[in-house]
Image (cartoon, rainbow, N blue to C red):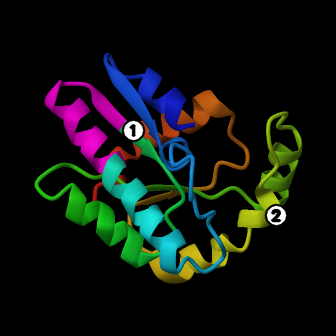
Amino acid sequence: MAGALAARFERGAHIEGEALWQQIVSGRAMPAPDLEGESERQYELTIRNQCLLARSYAEAEITPVMEFVVATRHHLDAYRHYLMGGVLRFVVLAPTPEVVRRRDAGRRDKQVAERFLHLGKVMRDELAGAGLWLDSSALDVDETVDALLEGRKGALLA
């Protein structure tokens, strides 16, 4: 979805957190349900690197769109810290669990729904009221991007 959103801008860049994390080819600590220790350190490093790239793109007048799982207030605050002085919009795509499972089953490259579905409750508890929450259950990619662009003011974080 982030790539489709970035493609809508005259100049847009998609900064995928997971791809940055996977650049650690030796000693990568995979994310666990409760990030701690090395896994947490690498997660925060990924956030910092996303923000560095976002600043670089923004300075070059290219709109950055970052994609990563942000489940806690602590991690959202890390984005705020690393982007201090810049513009940060926060969006949570929140389709129903049934839709998540169906879409995930249709992926050819990887199925990850069961590993991440528990985060829905964590995110609601931790991040309620932050940014734009969009139930994209009944929307296709283009409709979701349209809704994101229409709701961008609601996504703006102070």
Amino acid type at mark 2: Glu
Residue at x 52% of width, y 30% of height: 3
Give me the disc on residue 65.
1
Give me the disc on residue 105.
none
Give the side of residue 70 with respect to residue 59, left or right: right
Q: Farthest left residue?
A: 85
- At label 2, counting other C-alpha atoms closer than 10 Å, the crowd grade (few under 14, some 14-19, many 20 or more) is few
Amino acid type at mark 1: Val
Asked whether residue 158 appears in the rendered view, the answer is no
Residue at x 31% of width, y 67% of height: 78
In magenta, the rendered stretch is 50-64
- On the rendered image, what quadrant is the N terminus found in? top right
Give the side of residue 20 with respect to residue 105, left or right: left
Asked whether residue 129 appears in the rendered view, the answer is yes
Where is residue 77 shown, x and y percent of the image? 31, 71
Residue in front for this viewpoint, 14 or 34: 34
Where is residue 84 shown, x and y percent of the image? 15, 59
Label 2 SS: helix
- On the rendered image, what quadrant is the C terminus found in? bottom left
| Residue linked to disc 2 | 114
Residue at x 54% of width, y 41% of height: 19
Label 1 SS: strand
Q: Is residue 70 magenta?
A: no
Residue in front for this viewpoint, 51 or 104: 51
Sequence order check, earlier mark of 1 and 2: 1
Residue at x 82% of width, y 37% of height: 107
